[in-house]
Image: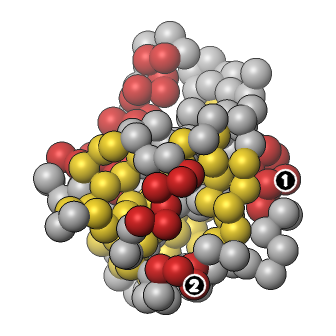
């Protein structure tokens, strides 16, 4: 089993965003794998003071005590306007594993689209880089069973800005807006007409 994980943390002009949610997910992963030693992640992060950066924090629990390595990458948003719907019942990405082979293999099926939307057991889950939300009857709903419990998803649920629901593949046609959620883009509404997003 892969036991190397990572967090993608946003930093703008040296300011680190929502680190407490990354800390919670990191600690939950360690607890799930019976790792008792936990670190304060803020002690490992010192981002550049100018610009928008993706802080990639990798932690390896194959070593005892586990190791943490942080690298900084200038961030340029990837435009996502079109999603291809892909069915895959055996994909598993319940932890933020450094190895993304399963997701990468599915991504290769996107054809001319920008990314994919993965359907597992007829339920909507995630794209390869983000959780998803749909506008439904005056509120934003997000899949109750995503592939990965994202930190932005968790924060927006805590804030009452989005709500969980089981979303079936056949429901997609009924929604009027689509948004993607992750640590770098926060809550990003796709501006295409909803009927044109899925290809």
In the rendering, at what x and y percent does residue 16 appear? Answer: 33, 65
Q: Foreground residue, 180 or 111?
A: 111
Residue visible at 57% across and 68% down in the picture: 72
Q: Left or right of 67: which side holds 151?
A: left
Instruction: Locate the C terminus by quadrant.
Output: bottom right
In the rendering, at what x and y percent does residue 165 appear? Answer: 33, 43
**Is residue 72 in view from this perspective?**
yes
Q: Residues within 10 Å of mark 1 (few under 14, many from 20)?
A: few
Per the rendering, the mark at residue 196 is 2
Front of the two marks 2 and 1: 2
Residue visible at 79% across and 69% down in the picture: 110
Q: Left or right of 156: which side holds 82?
A: right
Residue visible at 44% across and 17% down in the picture: 31
Colour convention = secondary structure
Q: In this view, does 75 lie above or below 96?
A: below
Q: Give the secondary structure at mark 1.
A: helix
Q: Give the secondary structure at mark 2.
A: helix
In the rendering, at what x and y percent does residue 64 appear? Answer: 62, 18
Q: Foreground residue, 169 or 60?
A: 169
Per the rendering, the mark at residue 105 is 1
Q: Is residue 167 above or below residue 194?
A: above
Residue visible at 85% across and 63% down in the picture: 108
């Amino acid at each position: 089993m892969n036991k190397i994980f990572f967090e993608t943390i946003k930093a703008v002009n040296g300011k680190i965003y929502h680190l407490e949610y990354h800390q919670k997910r990191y600690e939950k992963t360690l607890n799930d794998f019976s790792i008792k030693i936990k670190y304060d992640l803020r002690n490992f992060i010192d981002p550049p003071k100018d610009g928008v950066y993706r802080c990639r924090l990798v932690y390896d629990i194959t070593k005892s005590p586990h190791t943490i390595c942080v690298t900084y990458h200038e961030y340029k948003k990837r435009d996502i306007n079109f999603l291809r719907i892909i069915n895959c019942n055996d994909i598993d990405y319940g932890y933020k594993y450094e190895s993304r082979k399963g997701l990468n293999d599915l991504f290769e099926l996107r054809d001319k689209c920008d990314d994919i939307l993965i359907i597992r057991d007829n339920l909507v889950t995630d794209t390869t880089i983000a959780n998803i939300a749909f506008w439904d009857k005056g509120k934003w709903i997000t899949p109750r069973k995503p592939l990965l419990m994202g930190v932005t998803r968790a924060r927006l649920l805590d804030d009452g800005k989005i709500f969980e629901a089981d979303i079936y593949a056949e429901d997609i046609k009924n929604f009027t807006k689509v948004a993607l959620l992750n640590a770098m883009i926060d809550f990003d509404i796709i501006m295409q007409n909803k009927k044109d997003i899925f290809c």
